Image (cartoon, rainbow, N blue to C red):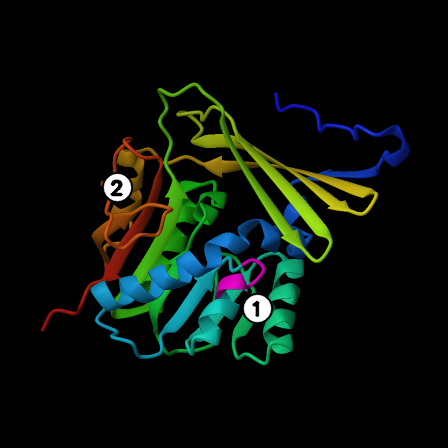
Amino acid sequence: MPPRPPSSSSPSRQRSAVALTSSTAWYDTPLYYDMVYADYTAMETRFIEGICRRHAGTGRRPLRVLEPACGSGRLLESLSRRGHHVHGFDLNRHQVAFARDRLRRKGLKGRVWIDSMDRFKLPTERPFDVVHCFVSTFKYLTTGAAAKRAIRLMAAAARPGGLVLIGLHMSDYRDRREGYERWIGRRRGLKVISHTWSYRPDRRTRLEPMKTRMRILRGDQVRVEDTHWNFRTYSPKELKELIAQAPALELVACHDFRYELHSTRRIDNEYGDIILVLRRKQPRP
């Protein structure tokens, strides 16, 4: 099990802690969530632009971008700043409110609304150059039916020749080790330390138990947020089966979470992270 959070080493500076545990804790506090992923924003932005130039023939013109499960809106802001037309939705109302407010405060344009990945409806009939969903968010869809609906909706939202980008961690059912990742974010007197554990995936149920513990430090105050949930698992074979559920898409490349255009991957167990670059097929003449 994960280690207990360390206490302050100085009795005179003992911090008071407030604890919260739920299935949505860190999503209900968008600022902390945003701080954890902030370092990825520039890499992901450059990757989206570069992969569209390479595989969607967009050149350097402004992109029409859709982000299912947009979270705090960090990529909506980054891409809008660079002149792209951004749309995004999320199921968590706190994240949507935060994303809307950040665009408004920065004087940026973009549309953000509450919706789910597997049943979303678009506020526009114009298709998108790119639909992207990174950091394993797609794995929150824990049934095969929901995953199938989602990838088909994402395909339908892309223009012919447009891209669907899905980034996730694959599962190796032979590996019995627990996974662990740690991030630290700092912003104006606030520090967030995020620990994420992934536990042994179940091949039968296709579920992988997950836990995130965030320690939020501000002065002498400490807030601890534990979030528990399940991810749907994807072995290389199962990921290929998912792609086959969307016949309108073709796989044109795979990358990893370093977001390097020059470095490609294969769908196998050699590397756990994968970014699928899927392109909507052109209609036959």
Left-right relation of 71 to 30: left
Q: Is residue 50 magenta?
A: no
Residue 152, image quadrant: bottom left
In the figure, is residue 87 to the left or right of 31?
A: left
State the residue at coordinates (58%, 49%).
36
Residue at label 2?
240
The residue wearing badge 1 is: 113
The boundaries of the magenta stretch are 71-75
Q: Look at the numbered disc 1 and give the secondary structure of its residue.
A: strand
> Looking at the picture, does residue 230 appear above or below residue 167?
above
The amino acid beneath tag 2 is Lys
Image quarter in which the N terminus is found: top right
Q: Secondary structure at mark 2?
A: helix
Q: How far across and how far down the image is residue 115, in percent?
A: 54, 62
Which quarter shows the C terminus? Answer: bottom left
- State the image coordinates of residue 2 (x, y, percent, origin top left): 62, 24
Give me the residue at 49% from left, 37% from top.
231
In the rendered image, the vertical position of residue 32 relative to residue 200, given as above or below: below
Residue pictured at 65% horizontal, 71% vertical: 101
Left/right placement of residue 120 relative to residue 48 reads right
Foreground residue among 102 and 136: 102
Q: Position of residue 90 (x, y in %)?
A: 55, 60
Tell me, yes or no, if residue 122 can be seen here: no
N-terminal-most mark, 1 or 2: 1
Q: Please tell me whether residue 276 is drawn above or below residue 128 in the rendered image.
A: above
Residues under labels 1 and 2: Cα distance?
31 Å
Q: Look at label 1 and name its amino acid.
A: Trp
Q: Quadrant of residue 103?
A: bottom right
